[in-house]
Image (cartoon, helix red, strand yellow):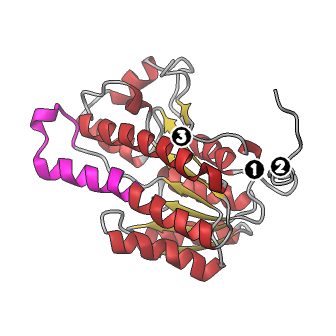
Amino acid sequence: MENNTHTDTPVPTTATAGLLARKVAFVTGAGRGIGAAAARLFAREGARVMLAARTEEQLKAVAEEVRAAGGTADHVVCDLADARSVRAAVARTVEVYGRLDVAFNNGATIQPPGPMDGLPEADFDHVCTVNLKGVWLAMVAEVAAIRATAGTGAIVNNSSVGSHRANPELPAYAAMKRAVNSLTESAAVTYGPEGIRVNAVAPGGTLTEMIRAWEERSPGLRDRLRARTPLGRAADPGEIAEAAAWLLSDRASYVSGAVLKVDGGAGA
């Protein structure tokens, strides 16, 4: 085991300064749910945050909430299905804050629940475009921005515990999340030598609008998810955000290529 001291090893951020002190963070899907919780948390932990999503009203509300609490936040409208929009959102972050250090690629869409032979091709294409291509587009733009400004940094992608097993109710959604895991691992190997870490979180059942929409089409869903979860409850969005914040922070300086389950033990 080596114990040499390297001068380029990141210095862990002190607890009093905040996990993400002095960092600029870009968050997709930041208008609600896990993304909004992440924006609030990252700001509390010292980051200057750029919120991105499709719905400007939601973004404005969250950004104003962050600023009212003493944090620094701005917003940009971003459609993950539109390559130009994704690149422009990352560029806007650098324009406003002068750099990019960390990014949380949280934005996603859900498919209509049901077996794969009942899913219209257009819906499959849309899930693929937003949940896979959108993440790829964001990562490419983020890597370029980190390289050009901060030099080193970290990216976290939001996956799903459903990416680790069969998901007959959401087969396309789960397939895209499994592909996100692969992108995450490949990017970690590719960009690690430059000092850019890439990880993912894989949430279990979380109390978001997406789960509520799924339950409308699949009654009893939350009870079924709870029954499969050793901790016996769903996650609050803030609990997923906490895991992402840690992975983005210098406290996780030797963690890269991981897909961290944040699922109350459901995937054990």
Pick out the residue farthest to the bottom: 95
User: Which three-letter amino acid code belongs to the residue tagged 2?
Assistant: Pro
Q: Which residues are magenta?
A: 112-135
Task: Specify which label sits upstream in the sequence, 2 or 1.
Answer: 2
58 relative to 98 in the view: left or right: left
Q: Which residue is at a point 55% across and 46% down the rendered structure image?
A: 188
Q: Nearer the viewer, residue 233 or 18?
A: 18
Whether the residues at callouts 2 and 1 have beta carbons within 8 Å, the answer is yes
Residue receiving disc 2: 12
How dense is the environment of label 3, judged by Cα within 10 Å: few (below 14), some, or many (20 and up)?
A: many
- Indicate which label's residue lies in the foreground, 2 or 3: 2
Place residue 264 in its image quadrant: top right
152 relative to 170 in the view: left or right: right
Query: Real-space Cα distance between discs 2 and 3?
Result: 21 Å
**Does 114 sit above or below residue 83?**
above
User: Which three-letter amino acid code belongs to the residue tagged 3?
Assistant: Val
Residue receiving disc 3: 201
Place residue 240 in its image quadrant: top right
Task: Specify which label sits upstream in the sequence, 2 or 3.
Answer: 2
Check residue 131 for magenta coloring. Answer: yes
Query: Real-space Cα distance between discs 3 and 1?
Result: 17 Å
